[in-house]
Amino acid sequence: MTALKGTCHCKKLSWTLTGDPGSITACNCTLCRRYGTLWAYDYENERIRINGPSQVYTRTDGAQPSLEIHFCPTCGCVLCWRGLKPQKDGRRRIAVNVRLAEPEAVADLLIDHFDGLTTFEDLPRDGRCVKDLWF
């Protein structure tokens, strides 16, 4: 089984995603567009594992905060977001920032665009891959 790996700049914090990451999400919400993140999703301690000590920022811009952002306390890289509450089945949603992976490992993964700013809906796929958004 293949695994993608990503590390912060100082390498004190890392993630591993085992198996097919599927398509990657680019979101335009007030937070994601500022961070410039690209997300791969799964569940905490299932296909995604986080290693190292992180700092946490909890979104407080909504009536009911639903996620927290984990970043490196040394170099500041955004590692992942994590759901604040487990789902009904007890699993906790998590997404890792694929911009922390080596470019060749994620270059050909398709991008899905999500309008987290206004409609909170998926946008039509335009065929772009991660390599199309690196620069």
Image (tube, helix red, strand yellow):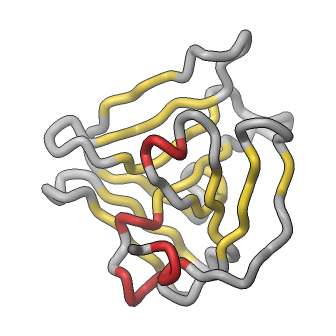
Which residue lies at the image location 72% right of the left edge and 62% below the top edge?
113
Q: Residue furthest top?
A: 63
Residue drawn at x 66%, y 58% as measured from the top left: 42
Q: Which of the pair 9/15 is nearer the observer?
A: 9
Residue displayed at 52% across by 45% down:
33
Up the image or down, 41 lies above or below 66; here it is below
| Between 44 and 59, the one nearer to me in the picture | 59
The spot of residue 128 in percent (x, y) is 65, 81
Residue 45 versus residue 65: which sits nearer the camera?
Answer: 65
Q: Quadrant of residue 92?
A: top right
| Residue 102 percent across, percent down from the top left | 33, 79
Q: Is residue 66 left or right of residue 6?
A: right
Q: Quadrant of the C terminus?
A: bottom left
Where is the N terminus found, in terms of image quarters?
A: bottom right
| 75 with respect to 32 (left or right) | left
| Residue at 65% across, 62% down | 25
| Residue 29 at x, y percent in the picture | 63, 39
23 sits left or right of 7 in the view: right
Return the x and y of residue 81 as percentages of the image width and height: 53, 42
Residue 32, above or below 69: below
Count of numbered tags: 0
